[in-house]
Image: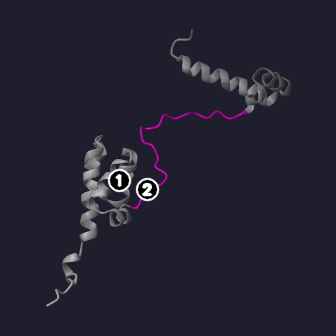
Amino acid sequence: MHSGTSLRGRLKAFFEAIDKEASQNPAFAAQLSGVFGDHACDPVTRNRPTSGHTRVTSIPDVFKAMQEKGEEEFRFWLRSLDIPTLRAIVKRNGFDPARASQRWKDSDKFIALVSDQTLARLKRGSAFLPPKAQNPTPE
């Protein structure tokens, strides 16, 4: 063993020598293809571990859902969603600018945040609207 070089470094040099020889010697490349099949010349792809985040493909429109379902039914509907979807809703709509929810693992916290923020944004500006007309009582 050579002192001063790691096993990883020696293996890397070994495979680089094999690659160089295969690119210069067609007979050697054919012999490698016979041993490894068609995969001898394929580029190496590394599987990187995910950082624990799953990508959500479709993020539901919470404002439309709140208007269609009402506040109580909306909260029950939010319970049917998984945590990555709830995180995506919070991120997409900017419900947590301080990013405190990034460490949350409890879906109840996300449900409370999403429902409160959605309701608040739907009511925003309603103080400036005229009151709803009430049905006049017959005299």
Image quarter (top left, top right, bottom left or bottom right) of the C terminus: bottom left
Q: Quadrant of the N terminus?
A: top right
Picture coordinates of residue 11, whole percent (x, y): 61, 20
Going from the N terminus, do you reach mark 2 or mark 1 first? 2
Dot 2 crowding, Cα within 10 Å, few <14, some 14–19, many 20+: few
What residue is shown at x 27% (from left), y 57% (from top)?
72
How far across and how far down the image is residue 106, in percent?
28, 41
Q: Which residue is found at the position 25% from the left and 48% from the top?
A: 100
x, y percentage for residue 41?
A: 74, 32
Q: Which residue is mark 2?
A: 59
Element carrying mark 2: loop
Amino acid carrying mark 2 in the image:
Ile
Cα–Cα span, label 2 and label 1: 14 Å
Mark 2 or 1: in front is 1
- Residue at which label 1 appears: 77
Circle 1: residue type: Trp
Residue 60 part of the magenta segment: yes
**Residue extending farthest top:** 1
Q: Secondary structure of the magenta portion, mostly?
A: loop
The magenta segment is 42-61
Q: Vertical placement of 44 versus 57: above or below? A: above
